[in-house]
Image (cartoon, rainbow, N blue to C red):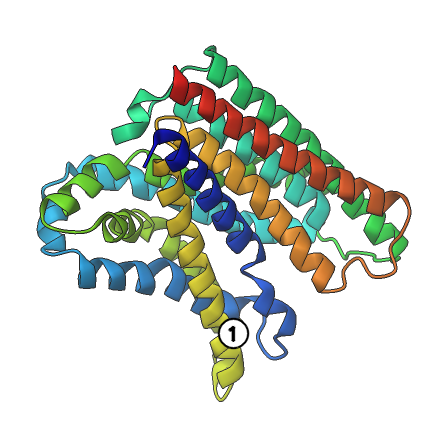
Amino acid sequence: MSMNTTMLLGVLVVVIAGLIQGSGGWPIKVMKKFGYEQWAFIGMLGGLIIIPWAVTLLFCPRAFEAYGSVDPMVVIKSNIFSLSWGIANILCMLCFVRIGFSLTGGILTGIGVSLGVIMPMIFKGSGLFSQAPDLNSPAGRLVLIGVAVMIIGVVVASLAGFGRDKALQKTQQKSGSFLVGLIMAIIAGALSCGISFAFVYSQGPIVQAMMDRGAGEIPANFAVWAVGLMGGALINVLYPAYLMTKNKTWNVMKGAGKEILLAIIISINLSVGIALMGKGMLMLGALGASVGFGVQQAMQMLGTQGVGFVGGEWKGVHGSPRRLIYTAVALLIIAALIMAYGNKVAGTN
């Protein structure tokens, strides 16, 4: 397979990963009994812990021996990054209440993409990503242009969200200080790229250790997520468990077979989306850590908007908000194309 073909497939894989992650929460739209704490507990437990560990233990021979051969700091570092992502998820939920969905989503994505794309070109990742071009290289500059276009798209999407809410006369009940919510959203945005960094800065030695003992490439990648996401997984599972204990709502899951199945679908979507993101990054080559995350985030936003349209969130909304959201979608696609071209330039140098 030629390098160009591999890179093209890599772009396709991260596009699919983003769309899956952006639209993977669709079962929430049809749940009638479960609140956040019920579906999050099942979805995160399955998607972040059960599925990655099941794949690792079933398809990676002598997995614990392989982990033992890796520098412990690699595992510690990946868990610190994933813990930061887990904290960002909790802050995000709190920000929805304080400053609303549109502003929260815009701040999180804008800051998260900026850091997630730029940092691996400054502080090189592990394995293949250690050869990433610098920011001031031709490829680096193209990727930065793509990031700028994407941030504009995120701002336009946020404005469209405000317009939609106004058109629907939707008043979001906010609680607490707006300034505190704004600061929380900024912190959450900075921490949100931790899920990418957990893979970028640890995959090299872990994948190599697994493959040295007979694991295939895909199970070896799952092994990175299994051990690297534990920090983020614990906080994402323990927080909804705390809420159910506090609110005495554990019994909501009793006899709710359909809802549990829907939550399991969320967990499968989450795990598949995360795994594909890592695989796509590697297929994109040395710049894959930056380009893969950038394209994945752009497509994740498109997936989220798609669920919103199908779910009727834009029903009855016309005029400026619709034009803005169509413009935002176009900008996100253009941004993804620019970053993909930047990756091609990196591959030809």
Secondary structure of the residue carrying numbered label 1: helix
Residue 30 x/y as whole percent: 63, 74
The C terminus appears in which quarter of the rendering?
top left
Check disc 1 and give the amino acid type.
Leu
**In the image, what residue occupies the spot 71% across and 53% down?**
175
The answer to whether residue 6 is left or right of residue 302 is left
Q: Quadrant of the N terminus?
A: top left
Residue that carries the numbered disc 1 in the rendered image: 262
| Residue 213 visible to the viewer | yes
Q: Position of residue 300 (x, y in %)?
A: 57, 47
Q: Is residue 163 above or below residue 240?
A: above
Residue 292's spot in the image, x, y percent?
A: 45, 36
Report the front residue among 23 and 48: 23
In the depicted view, which residue is nearer to us: 338 or 28? Answer: 338
Name the residue at 43% across, 25% down. Answer: 119
Instruction: Check the image and name the residue furthest to the top.
Output: 136
257 horizontally vs 228: left or right: right
